[in-house]
């Protein structure tokens, strides 16, 4: 317990992967989540925070921690193609695909390259910025962890053949307090359930260990990952997963003399990272096999290096995909025409020097836009837009104010993905209910999936308890600035 209340009020941000507003509200209203209910009733509840794009954890966590979209932080998704190395990067999209690519390479991609090579050096994570101010932080169970403290991580001998690191050891820069699977543990004798992550119980125990030993730093970011897995199979309205995590939060709040005391001593925040779109149950109707639609072209095989003859590379992020056109003699328009013929494909977007172009398999016409111009959106970003606004469900008022419908903060988020890495590529989104498939990608029939720009997977809840501060806009990209403000004020007063 923190005895130093006069000095600081630690900020604890719990990120519950795939927590969504509707099931959260139902769980709370039906008494299934008393701890979350307590935090909501004694704080601020924002049900519609806009996530990042693609709506995939690594991109979203990078957005939360750096306060930027993918155009600045450079983590394009869970699965993308690195043109400079001619290599498909996969941070672990599923067992089958990861196996084809090689488990060693995936672990290397996720644990090392993501933080040390891909995450842009031009942006600072909240951990780095706090460290520069002499403020310590903790990261528990997050794959995005870049901080200022060099740390030697090692893989237990039995598993060291799984990694590319010499003797299973490598040096990376993390937060001063760092927990990630078997690689770095806060409790010496603990056993994480998976190699690279812990389950809810494990994660919560690591957090409680910090509280019990009075070691909570000013900022702690803690990720609960199991809910996502359940929802992919059980659909978005599964409540059991929320109940289980709530039990862990109850145990954590119980470490204090009372729950009121827990929020007197700390700022507690609970967020979701992405929503889920329910998926249909008939394979032929709901799984969009991109290899079939593009079968007249030579598509790179993921288990071997890219060949000279390969014309296309498909990198699927569930309901979103990057389609790389390697063959310079193949015009983008030929590929776009094929995609447009499938009415299950929603947004199709690409960029040229000056602007971004949008088409759709569901709606007619085209739309172009670029940043800067006569329209001001609800986040005070300015744009020039022309063409059929319905493609991105944009609304424009007589005062040239621009607001969003089905695709929250669409212009900025789509811009982010299209400028997240070099290459000649298209971004495609699947219609609600559908999922993309390429070679060995996991798909989710009669369950749920995410990845796209659609509001179903883009609006997530945020609960803030123990402070009156709020982010300037309800977007995850605005979290970092808000957290920094809170950490600085936590440090001086209270
Ligand atoms: Zn997921």
Image (cartoon, rainbow, N blue to C red):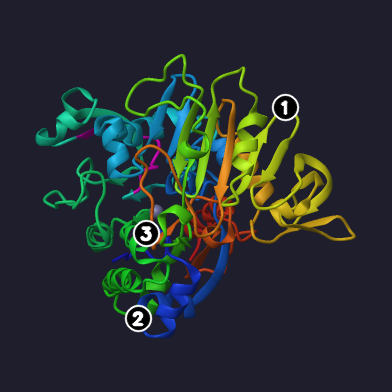
Q: Decide: few, some or many residues near mark 3? Use Cα within 10 Å; few <14, some 14-19, many ≥20.
A: many
Q: Residue furthest bottom?
A: 30
Pointer 3: what residue?
232
User: Earlier along the polypeptide chain: callout 3 or callout 1?
Assistant: 3
For the residues labelled 3 and 1, the Cα–Cα distance comes to 38 Å
Quarter containing the N terminus: bottom left
- Label 2 CB less than 8 angstroms from ligand 1: no
Q: Is mark 3 within 8 Å of ligand 1?
A: yes
Vertical order, 425 against 371 (above or below): above
For the residue labelled by badge 2, is the local secondary structure a helix, a strand or a loop?
Answer: loop
How far apart are the two marked residues, 1 and 2, measured between alpha carbons?
52 Å
Q: Is residue 204 left or right of residue 349?
A: left
Earlier along the polypeptide chain: callout 1 or callout 2? 2
Tell me the residue that label 2 is attached to.
32
Residue occupying the point 28% across, 41% down: 96
- Residue 356 appears in view: yes
Question: Does the segment drawn in magenta span residue 123?
Answer: no
> Which range is magenta?
142-154
């Amino acid at each position: 317990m923190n005895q130093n209340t006069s000095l600081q009020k630690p900020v604890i941000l719990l990120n519950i992967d795939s927590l969504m507003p509707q099931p959260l509200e139902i769980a709370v209203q039906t008494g299934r989540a008393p701890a979350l209910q307590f935090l909501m009733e004694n704080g601020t509840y924002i049900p519609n925070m806009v996530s990042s794009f693609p709506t995939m954890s690594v991109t979203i966590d990078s957005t939360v921690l750096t306060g930027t979209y993918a155009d600045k932080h450079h983590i394009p998704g869970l699965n993308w193609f690195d043109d400079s190395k001619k290599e498909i990067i996969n941070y672990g999209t599923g067992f089958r695909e990861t196996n084809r690519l090689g488990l060693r390479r995936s672990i290397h991609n996720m644990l090392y390259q993501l933080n040390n090579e891909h995450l842009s050096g031009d942006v600072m994570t909240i951990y780095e910025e706090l460290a520069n101010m002499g403020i310590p932080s903790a990261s528990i169970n997050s794959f995005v962890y870049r901080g200022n403290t060099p740390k030697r991580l090692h893989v237990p001998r039995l598993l060291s053949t799984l990694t590319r690191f010499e003797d299973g050891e490598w040096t990376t820069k993390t937060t001063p307090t760092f927990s990630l699977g078997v690689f770095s543990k806060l409790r010496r004798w603990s056993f994480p359930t998976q190699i690279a992550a812990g389950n809810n119980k494990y994660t919560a125990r690591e957090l409680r260990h910090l509280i019990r030993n009075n070691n909570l730093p000013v900022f702690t970011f803690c990720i609960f990952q199991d809910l996502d897995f359940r929802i992919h199979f059980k659909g978005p309205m599964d409540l059991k997963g929320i109940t289980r995590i709530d039990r862990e939060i109850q145990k954590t709040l119980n470490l204090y003399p009372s729950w009121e005391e827990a929020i007197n001593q700390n700022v507690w925040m609970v967020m979701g990272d992405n929503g889920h779109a329910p998926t249909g149950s008939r394979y032929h109707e709901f799984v969009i096999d991109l290899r079939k639609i593009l079968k007249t072209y030579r598509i790179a095989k993921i288990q071997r290096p890219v060949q000279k003859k390969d014309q296309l590379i498909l990198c699927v992020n569930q309901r979103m995909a990057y389609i790389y056109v390697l063959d310079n003699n193949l015009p983008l328009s030929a590929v776009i025409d094929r995609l447009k013929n499938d009415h299950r494909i929603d947004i199709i977007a690409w960029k040229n020097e000056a602007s971004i172009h949008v088409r759709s398999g569901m709606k007619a016409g085209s739309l172009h836009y670029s940043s800067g111009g006569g329209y001001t959106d609800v986040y005070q970003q300015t744009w020039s837009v022309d063409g059929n606004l319905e493609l991105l469900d944009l609304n424009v008022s007589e005062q040239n104010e621009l607001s969003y419908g089905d695709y929250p903060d669409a212009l900025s988020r789509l811009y982010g993905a299209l400028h997240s890495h070099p290459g000649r590529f298209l971004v495609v989104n699947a219609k609600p209910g559908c999922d993309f498939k390429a070679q060995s990608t996991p798909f989710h029939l009669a369950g749920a999936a995410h990845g796209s720009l659609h509001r179903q997977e883009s609006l997530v809840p945020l609960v803030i308890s123990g402070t009156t501060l709020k982010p300037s806009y309800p977007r995850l990209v605005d979290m970092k600035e808000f957290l920094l403000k809170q950490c600085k004020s936590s440090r001086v007063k209270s």
